[in-house]
Amino acid sequence: MTIGRLIDGRSAAILTCQADASVREAVALLAERRIGALPVMDGERVAGIFSERDVLYRLHEFGAGALDRPVRDVMTAPAVTVGRETQVLAALSLMTRRRIRHLPVIEGERMIGFVSIGDLVKYRIDRIESEAEAMRAYIQTA
């Protein structure tokens, strides 16, 4: 299964923040929406990822003053991305190797999706359960 097939049919808009937004504004968005990361946009281009980890690391490094900095100064950049054709298992492997939890899905220069490790793990669990059920049904009819 490809990432493209996984994100096909999603209708919700991808929540993002602009690179010049303050860390305080981005943190408020993470908290209000109860999410762990945002793609950071510089116009229409993905400039990086802003995550809970970025907040923690910068608060430790700069103290409360980090909240007044622009997101571009504290985000993780460049963003690690995948394309529509990337296989789910390859994306999971990439996330594990790079120790990241979110991937923008890019087509050309445009972001067309945003997947979390939870999305990919859920797909794998559903797939494994489906295969196990098919195996049980086969054994019962044999």
Image: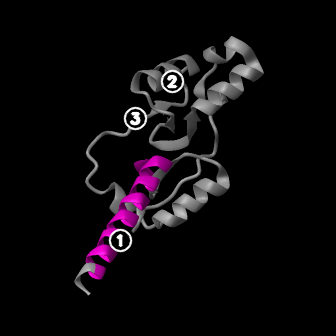
Nearest to the observer: residue 15 or residue 121 = 121
Determine if the magenta segment contains residue 78. no
Q: Is residue 28 left or right of residue 66?
A: left
Q: Quadrant of residue 24?
A: top right
Say how the picture is coloured.
Answer: one colour
Percent across and percent down for residue 43 are 47, 37
Percent across and percent down for residue 65 are 69, 12
At 28% from the left edge and 49% from the top edge, which residue is drawn? 10
What kind of residue is marked 3?
Answer: Leu
The residue sitting at the left extreme is 141
Q: Quadrant of residue 141?
A: bottom left
Residue matched to label 2:
26
Closer to us: mark 1 or mark 3?
1
Q: Is residue 75 left or right of residue 12?
A: right
Relative to residue 98, is residue 71 depicted above or below? above
Residue matched to label 3:
15
Nearest to the observer: residue 87 or residue 13 = 87
Look at the image and tell me in which quarter the N terminus lies.
Answer: bottom left
Pointer 1 and pointer 3: residues touching (CB < 8 Å)?
no
Callout 2 secondary element:
helix
What kind of residue is marked 1?
Answer: Glu
Residue matched to label 1:
131
Q: What range is drawn magenta here?
A: 110-139
Determine if the magenta segment contains residue 130. yes
Nearest to the observer: residue 85 or residue 52 = 52
What kind of residue is marked 2?
Answer: Ala
The secondary structure that most of the magenta stretch takes on is helix
